[in-house]
Image (cartoon, grey):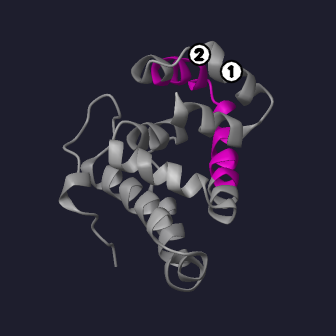
Amino acid sequence: MFFAPPPSYIYAEISHHNCSKEDCAKVADIITTLANNGKLSLLMSHKKRLEQLGDELTNVNPLQFLQIILEDPTLKDCLRRVEKDHFKWSNFTSSMGQKLDSFKKTKDFPAKLKKFCNDLKIPIDAVTPYLQNKDYKGFIHKIATY
């Protein structure tokens, strides 16, 4: 069963994300669940549901996923809390890294990266080296702290 995040996380459809409000709510659910639960709880009670939510986000590319988080101060704070826990951060960045690696191979990636950086007001030169070196932990840390 889908757990609806608090109403403040439920976005109206945002055209620059091209994501439905349901997909935005799923992203919010994933990052808030990761931030608000301990390792044991995540493994025992939330793992399957989080994996299912991630599988349902087929229309959301990894840059959109990250942008949804970074444009909401509460979700961005959740990402920072995830980063403080080595277990959570390693698993999150590993999963995002796999998705980013696949997405980088698409013909749309350069344009999507440029738009992502423009929307978040991050110089593309500040993130390109991380992506070229497949340093996804560094990439996500950089965009989360910019």
- The part of the image, by quadrant, that contains residue 40 is bottom right
- Identity of the residue drawn at 60% across and 19% down: 110
Residue situated in front as seen by the camera: 92 or 79: 79
Image coordinates for residue 19, horizontal then vertical, percent: 33, 42
For label 1, the SS is helix
Task: Establish if 53 lies above or below 67.
Answer: below
Tell me if 89 is positioned left or right of 69 in this view: right
- Identity of the residue drawn at 69% across and 48% down: 98
Residue placed farthest to the bottom in the image? 44
Which amino acid lies under the numbered mark 1 shown in the image of this protein? Answer: Thr
Image coordinates for residue 82, horizontal then vertical, percent: 55, 57
Please provide the residue range marked out in magenta: 93-116
Q: Which mark is residue 128?
A: 1
- Label count reads 2
Instruction: Classify 10 Å Cα crowding around label 2: few (below 14), some (14-19), many (20 and above).
Output: some
Task: Establish if 113 lies above or below 8.
Answer: above
Pick the quarter of the image with the N terminus: bottom left
- The part of the image, by quadrant, that contains residue 104 is top right
For label 2, the SS is helix
Image coordinates for residue 124, horizontal then vertical, percent: 59, 15
The answer to whether marks 2 and 1 mark residues whose Cβ atoms lie closer than 8 Å is: yes
Tell me if 129 is positioned left or right of 9 in this view: right
Instruction: Classify 10 Å Cα crowding around label 1: few (below 14), some (14-19), many (20 and above).
Output: few
Residue situated in front as seen by the camera: 102 or 82: 82
Residue situated in front as seen by the camera: 74 or 109: 74
Q: Which mark is residue 124?
A: 2
Q: CA distance from mark 2 to mark 1?
A: 6 Å
